[in-house]
Amino acid sequence: MAKWNALSEEIAAARVSGDHTKLLEHVQAGLQMLKEIGATNAPIQCECLLCMEASQAHYQMAQYDEALQCAEKARESLLRDSKAELQDKAQIAEIEVFMGFVLCKQGSHSAAVEAQELLQKVLHWIDVDAKSAMPMQAVAAVNLRRSVLTGLGLSTTVQATTLANKGETAEAKVLYAKGLDTLIEALNHHIDENDFELVKMTLEGILASFEGLDDVSQAVATCRKYISWCRRHNDAGGVVDGEAMLTALCARRKIENPLEVEKAKEAEEGKK
């Protein structure tokens, strides 16, 4: 087990430093080691964990096809050679939620529809089947539900955007409104749990929905919420991203950027 512990530490160090290429090298070494010694001599769910590390690294590098392939391998490792009643349904659901986010990032209409179908399946498991599952799985299901809501909202918004790009404006607006409702519900849960990353991701979807609905004032307000959320959590990079989102929105909509107005006022007051 010493080798596995050392590998685990190397993977964790690469993850913390943000060296995704190095992390993928460690994962390959781990998968090779697993092949040589066999699953029975490796830590539990070892193949699944290695594949998900690789999937998340590819996701961070915006390599969404590779991220999806690795997540599918992780899921397959949990489904393979195990009876249905012994499968870790909560772990499978977590992987499928991540797959839903990856599909949304791919950006095509078909990928967004696939994400929606996958996430609806997970939501059914959470709301129906998980209630009679083992206590730990039932708790995991409750915690996962708000992530599923964000995924469903994003998948609807991506579908809306692809329709809008084809000029199907009326159909797009129906979907933007539907996605917005789901995303706002998810956002409230994420804020209650102080889930930093999911709040950011959900706000990005809300911004796309408001702009798709031509509600520019709410789109501006959403950018400002994003900036203030990042500022509150000392995320300087997030503040820069939020300001860039607002600047791009104002340029697209040909409106005055409120941040520039405020900076001008501050400069004026500083002269007094």
Image (cartoon, rainbow, N blue to C red):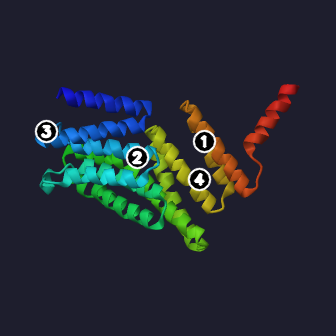
Describe the element under mark 2 as helix, strand or loop.
helix
Residue under label 2, please give it: 58
Describe the element under mark 3 as helix, strand or loop.
helix
Q: Nearer the viewer, mark 4 or mark 1?
A: 1
Q: In terms of sequence position, does the residue under pointer 2 or pointer 3 come before the other?
A: 3
Q: Identify the residue at image location x=70%, y=56%.
A: 252
Q: Is residue 132 left or right of residue 196?
A: left
Quadrant of image for the N terminus? top left
Residue under label 1, please give it: 241
Q: Kindly indicate the quadrant of the structure image that contains residue 149.
A: bottom left
Q: Nearer the viewer, mark 2 or mark 3?
A: 3
Q: Is residue 9 left or right of residue 159?
A: left
What's the amino acid at mark 4? Leu
Q: Identify the residue at image location x=32%, y=51%.
A: 71
Q: Distance between the Cα atoms at labels 2 and 4?
A: 25 Å
Where's residue 9, x and y in %?
30, 28
Where's residue 75, x and y in %?
26, 52
Q: Distance between the Cα atoms at labels 1 and 2?
A: 21 Å
Mark 2 near mark 4, Cβ–Cβ under 8 Å? no
In the rendering, which numbered label is found on residue 265? none
Binning the other alpha carbons within 10 Å of mark 3 as few (below 14), some (14 to 19) or many (20 upward) gives: few
Residue under label 4, please give it: 207
Image height check: is 120 above or below 250? below
Residue under label 3, please give it: 37
Q: Nearer the viewer, mark 2 or mark 4?
A: 2
Q: Distance between the Cα atoms at labels 2 and 3?
A: 26 Å
